Amino acid sequence: MTDNTVDDRVTSLQENLSALLDGRATRQQVDAVIAVCHALALTHVRSKRSAWRMMEFHGVSHADLAYDCIAELFRRDDAGVFTDLQAFFKDLSPGTADSAEILVHLRRLVFAKTNRTLSRLIADTDSLFFRITRNVRLAASMSGLFEETERFGETLLVPAGIDPQYHLPYLADARLAQVVWNAYSLSALIPVFMSRLHEALAGVHDACRVIPLMPVVLLIKEVHEGHYAHRESAVRPDALAEDAALEIVAVARRETGERFQREYVGKGKVTLEEFTAYLNAIQSILVTRIAEDAGNELSLFSALKGELGDVAEECYKRMHRSRIEYMARYMHQRVAEHLK
C-alpha cells in the first residue's frame, strides 16, 4: 500500500466510518477502515517485544499478527452491526468530528485491542507466562507496593508511595531488563521480588517509574527458561525409560490433537489425513529425541515427507510449515510440562 493510498484513507476516514456505523457502508468503505486499523495495529505490533515471541511461536508475520489483533473489531452481530466499533464511538460521533480527531480515537481503540490480543495469545499458549503473570499481579495487589492501571489496553504497574515521574520517559528496554534481573532471583518468592523492584524503582531519578506488566513477566520468564535449559542439559535424556517416554509423548500427542483438530480439520484448513500426518511426524521426532537421545538432525519437513509421501519443499513451506511448527511447539511444551 502506498503512502498516498494511506493518506487518502485517513482523509476519508470520517466519511467511511460514519457510513460503517450507520450500516450503509460499501465493501470498499469497510475495507478502507480495516486498512487504517491494520496500519495502526501493525505499527504497534512492530514495537512490541512480545510480538516477536508470538511470531516465533505461531510462525506468522507482523502483518498477519496485526490482522489477528483487530479481527474482533470487525465482527458483526445478527443484524450486521459492528458492535465493538458502535460501543466505542457512542460518545464521539464520526458525523460531527473531523478525520484527525477520529484517527486519534481509533488509535486508542486499536492499541488497546492489540495489547489485549497479544496478552491473550501468550496466556493461551504459554502456561509459564500465565503463572508468572498471575503471581506478579497477586503480589502487587496484596503487598500494596504497586497499583495497576491501564493505558491503551496495556497493564502498567505504578509504584505506590513514591512519585511515578510521569513527566519523564519510560525506562528503555535494556535498562528495564537490568532493573528486573537485578531484583529477581529463582530462590526468592514473588512478593520479595516485588519489594526489591519497588526499592529499585525508588532509586530511579531520570526516568518514569511506571513499568509495563507484560515486559516484566517476559523478563522473569527468561530467567526461568535459562534455568530449565541449564538443568535439562545436565540430565541425559536416556535417563528416562523408553516406555515412560513413549507414554508421555502419547499423552502430549492426544492433548495436541484435542487442541488443534477443530481449528484445523473442523474449519477445513487441512484434511484429517494431513492432520494425522502432522501428529505422527511430530511424535516420531519427540520419541527419538527423548527416548533414544538422538533425532536432533531430524526435521519436520523430512518427518512429514515420511508420512505424506513426496511433498515438495515449496508446497511444505506454503501449505504445511506454519501449522505443523505451531503444533510441534505446543506438543513439545506439553511434554516439558509432564516431565516436570
Image (cartoon, helix red, strand yellow):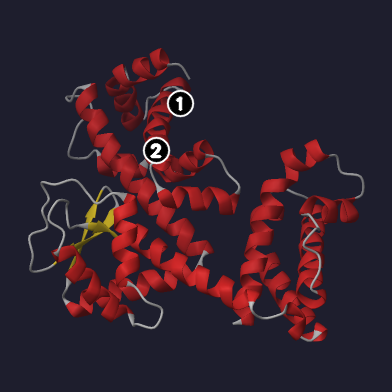
Left or right, 15 with respect to 45, comes to left
Q: Nearer the viewer, residue 241 or 82?
A: 241
Spot occupied by residue 111 in the image (x, y as percentages of width and height): 32, 43
Left or right, 297 with respect to 47, comes to right
Quadrant assignment for the C terminus: bottom right
Q: Identity of the amino acid at label 2?
A: Ala
Spot occupied by residue 108 in the image (x, y as percentages of width and height): 26, 40
Residue in view at x 20 percent, y 67 percent: 200
Residue in view at x 32 percent, y 27 percent: 17
Q: Nearer the viewer, residue 56 or 204?
A: 204
> What separation in Å lies between label 1 and label 2 (alpha carbons)?
15 Å
Disc 2, SS: helix
Left or right, 279 with respect to 160, comes to right
Query: For mark 2, does the 10 Å Cα neighbourhood hold few (<14), some (14 to 19), or many (20 or more) residues?
Result: many
Number of residue marks: 2
Residue 75 visible in rendering = no
Residue 12 vs 322, above or below: the answer is above
Residue in view at x 47 percent, y 24 percent: 27
Residue 335 vs 41, above or below: the answer is below
Residue beneath label 1, please? 31
Residue in view at x 31 percent, y 47 percent: 112
Residue beneath label 2, please? 41
Spot occupied by residue 270 in the image (x, y as percentages of width and height): 74, 49
Q: Nearer the viewer, residue 321 or 37?
A: 321
Residue 291 vs 85, above or below: the answer is below
Picture quadrant where residue 186 is located = bottom left
Disc 1, SS: helix
Query: For mark 1, does the 10 Å Cα neighbourhood hold few (<14), some (14 to 19), or many (20 or more) residues?
Result: some
Left or right, 311 with respect to 251, comes to right
